[in-house]
Amino acid sequence: MRRSVYVDDDGQVLEKDTKTHQQPRVALDAETVEVLREHRRRMETRAEALDLVADETRMFSYEPGGSACWLPDTV
């Protein structure tokens, strides 16, 4: 993902291109990668069961279909 999430002056959560227009890279250990994969599978299974699959499902979302992202300061 080459976008960042921010909250504007009206309190709306929006996305924008990153400052460098590059995809950020984060080094993760194998256990964390597996936990994230399991989480992703749970999110996809839940979304499919509810017939709510979004075009761009987010990993961390309050919406069952993953269509809305968390606020930047909640992760």
Image (cartoon, rainbow, N blue to C red):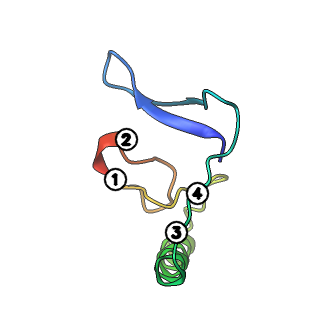
- Residue positioned 53% across, 70% down in the render: 28
Which of marks 2 and 4 precedes in the sequence? 4
In the image, residue 72 above or below residue 39: above
Dividing the picture into quadrants, the one containing residue 73 is top left
Residue furthest to the right in view is 22
Q: Secondary structure at mark 4?
A: loop
Disc 1 versus disc 2: distance between alpha carbons? Answer: 6 Å
Dot 3 and dot 4 residues touching (CB under 8 Å): yes
The structure residue drawn at horizontal position 32% and vertical position 17%, both measured from the top left corner, is 10
Q: Which residue is mark 3?
A: 47
Q: Secondary structure at mark 3?
A: helix
**Mark number for residue 72?**
2
| Labels 1 and 3 touching (C-beta < 8 A) | no
What secondary structure is marked by label 1? loop
Amino acid type shown at disc 2:
Pro
Q: Are marks 3 and 2 in contact (CB under 8 Å)?
A: no
Asked whether the residues under the numbered discs 1 and 2 touch, taking CB atoms below 8 Å apart as contact, a structural biologist would say yes
The label number, if any, that marks residue 57 in the structure image: 4
